[in-house]
Image: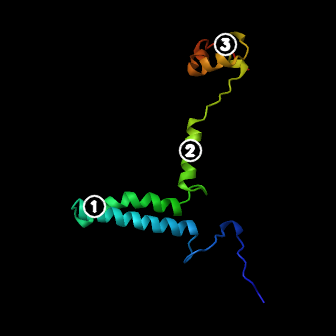
Amino acid sequence: MQIPVNKDLDSYKDDFFKGLTLKQTALSIISVAAGTGTFLFASYVLKLEQSVSFYLALPVVLPIAASGFLRIHGMTPLEYLKKRRSAITREVYYFIPEVLLPGGQERDPSSVKKMVKNPSFMLDDPEREVC
């Protein structure tokens, strides 16, 4: 008796309906409902043509559907955007070797921040030797 086992356990997903997970199924239903609602609103209330109504429904449907199916570096789009925002807003740290500090200054965090904002201190003395 042989029982088939998936060799790649990381790619295993629990099927809920027709190969989709519960989250994918729910977001599919939500995206279809939102697209239908947008299409009907644009067609019957705003009296737009059906092709224009369809194109107006796409920007509503695509982000909802993408959040269920799309993976960026193994993360959902919302997780990716949160990590990206935190990476962009993170404070930047600089390393300035003491050899490059002007006039034998000691390392002082406030002076280093001033020098990083104005890196011209390295150009003050072009004759200075760096080990």
Q: Which residue is mark 2?
A: 84
Q: Nearer the viewer, mark 2 or mark 1?
A: 1
Looking at the image, the residue that sits furthest to the front is 45
Q: Amino acid at mark 1?
A: Ala
Q: Which residue is mark 3?
A: 102
Q: Nearer the viewer, mark 2 or mark 3?
A: 2
Disc 2 versus disc 1: distance between alpha carbons?
35 Å
Residue 4 is left or right of residue 18, and the answer is: right
Query: Which dot marks residue 70?
Result: none
Percent position of residue 4, x then y:
72, 82
Q: Which residue is mark 1?
A: 42
Mark found first going from the N terminus, 2 or 1:
1
Q: Quadrant of residue 9?
A: bottom right
Q: Quadrant of residue 19?
A: bottom right
Disc 2 versus disc 3: distance between alpha carbons?
36 Å
Mark found first going from the N terminus, 2 or 3:
2
Dot 2: few (<14), some (14–19), or many (≥20) neighbours within 10 Å? few
Q: Amino acid at mark 3?
A: Pro
